[in-house]
Image (cartoon, grey):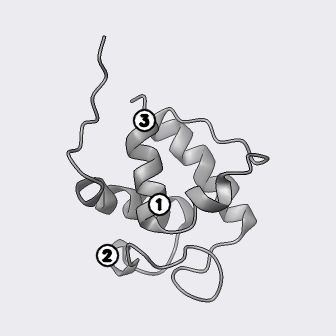
Amino acid sequence: MDMKPEYASVEELQPEVAELIVSTLELEIPANEIGIDDPLFGEEGPGLDSIDALELALAIDQRYGIKISSEDEDNETRFASLRALTHFIQTNRRK
């Protein structure tokens, strides 16, 4: 069975992923204020940390059926920005 993404583009999935970040981590910024290319970690953007990444990985598994190991060397790239995370989810989602 051919599994096609439910969304036609990263841009269409991006608001849902931004809302998942905000709601999961109980951020005090609106989801639409997370810039698609802003870094998710560090001084810019929402300023997430490693604990946030673990919580977010669990939420991604629950929502999209994507398991993300904390020891995966690609995590820095996957969680680099909202665009990178959305693209990763879009291409790997099972739900």
For discs 2 and 1, the disc positioned in front in the rendered view: 1
What residue is shown with label 1? 84
Dot 2 amino acid type? Asn
Closest to the observer, 34 or 9: 9
> Residue 35 at x, y = what percent?
38, 78
Name the residue tied to disc 2. Answer: 32
Residue 45: % across, % down: 51, 82
- At 52% from the left and 58% from the top, the residue drawn is 24
**Lateral position of residue 28 relative to residue 73, left or right:** left
- Mark 1: few, some, or many residues within 10 Å (few <14, many ≥20)? many
Q: Is residue 94 left or right of residue 78?
A: left
Counting from the top left corner in percent of width and height, residue 62 is at 52, 37
Task: Kindly identify the amino acid type of the residue bearing the numbered disc 1.
Answer: Ala
Res 93 label: 3
- Label 1: element kind: helix
Query: Disc 2 to disc 3, how far (Cα)?
Result: 22 Å
Using the numbered discs, state the Cα–Cα distance from disc 1 to disc 3 in whole angstroms: 14 Å
